[in-house]
Image: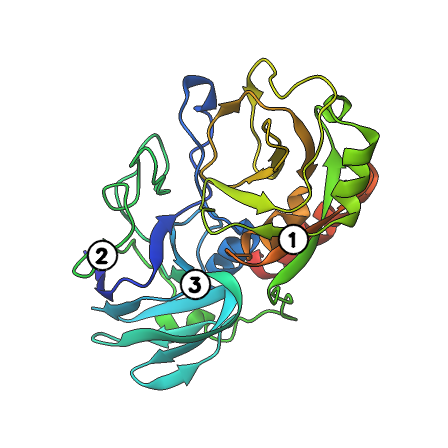
Amino acid sequence: MAEARVIKPGMLTTVQDLGRWGFQSRGVPVAGPMDSYSHRLANALAGNAAGAATVEVTLAGPELEFDDERVVAVAGAEFEVMVDGHSVSTHKAFTVFAGSRMTFGTRLRGARAYVAIQGGIAVTPVFGSRATHLVSRLGGVEGRPLTAGDSLPLGDPGPAKAGHYVRRQMPHQRQMPEGRARVRVLLGPQEDHFTDEARRVLETVPYRIGQNSDRMGFRLEGAPLTHVRGADIISDATPMGALQVPASGMPILLMADRQTTGGYPKIATVITADLGVAGQLGPGDTISFTVCSPGEAVAALIAQERELMVIEA
């Protein structure tokens, strides 16, 4: 089986697919990409199905060596990317050859990029998914970040020759955040546990993403959000994008590696169409929130899906 070898691992590099769905009722987290839009885009450019496993790059990229000819695409955060010392474009498919090395240079904007390789990363699925969940050490390569010397098995590239997809590119490139972003939220599901002042603060005060943030959640620093009836509820489901507020009043934005349930009230939830924007932020960046209507949330998701379908088709 063909492989891609990890020469240098980067800062936090993991194998991710669209996540481990269907097991949350048994306490198994979903995991998956922090920016599923960019994950799907990279796969579409490389000629893969949307659910194929990619390599998620965080803040500083890896060096990979390939042992056969493949189409590769990098989407998401904007990096300087080179193959055998020659610059290649992101958000556009390109070909690597046997012995080629791909390296990442300076990160320009955004926090996470996705490397899709024709055929996908063929690590052994766990509960039907190849996604790495770091806390429980499930999936990917031994449930951990990639390290130097790891070998990533590659799936069957299919009948198309490697050059078949190299003209694929985005009609336009989504703008990556440069240290700050504003995302839309729907109030709830427990907004009645918060004061009117808390809801006002949510929409008017930016929050800084703390240094102790990770794939499980962004710990936000800023003005506290005040409760009206305490900070404990009967534990319920925790979707990605939920703004969970413990007794300190400092919100936690739950992300891809979130737990399956939580016992703190959630004042709002980031809409699906904006989850990828939040996923492109890192420690030290700032995030702001705007409350929108359910209709606006649905319209934004439909528009995003249509854009992806153009490439995936």
Would residue 190 be seen by someone viewing this image from the given angle?
yes
In the rendered structure, the answer to whether residue 188 lies left or right of residue 38 reads right
Res. 1 image quadrant? bottom left
Name of the residue lying farthest toward the left: 149
Residue type, label 1? Ile
**Distance Cα–Cα, label 2 vs label 3:** 16 Å
Asked if residue 120 shows in the view, the reply is no
Between label 1 and label 2, give the one nearer the viewer: 1
What residue sits right under mark 1 in the picture? 287
Q: Residue at x 30, y 55 (%)?
A: 156
User: Which residue lies at the image location 27% right of the left edge and 56% below the top edge?
Assistant: 154
In the rendered view of the protein, which quadrant contains the C terminus?
bottom right
Determine crowd level at label 2: few under 14, some 14-19, many 20+ residues with C-alpha closer than 10 A: some
Residue 172 lies, with reference to residue 13, above or below; the image says below
Estimate the x, y position of residue 121 in percent, counting from the top left.
Answer: 32, 53
What residue is at 20 percent from the left and 75 percent from the top?
A: 99
Q: Position of residue 250 (x, y in %)?
A: 61, 37
Query: What kind of element bears circle 3?
Result: loop
The residue sitting at 64% across, 33% down in the picture is 249
Towards the viewer: 197 or 274: 197
Say which mark, if any, is on residue 59: 3
Task: Name the N-terminal-most of marks 1 and 3.
Answer: 3
Report the front residue among 48 and 239.
Answer: 239
Q: CA distance from mark 1 to mark 2?
A: 31 Å
The answer to whether marks 2 and 3 mark residues whose Cβ atoms lie closer than 8 Å is: no
Q: CA distance from mark 1 to mark 3?
A: 17 Å
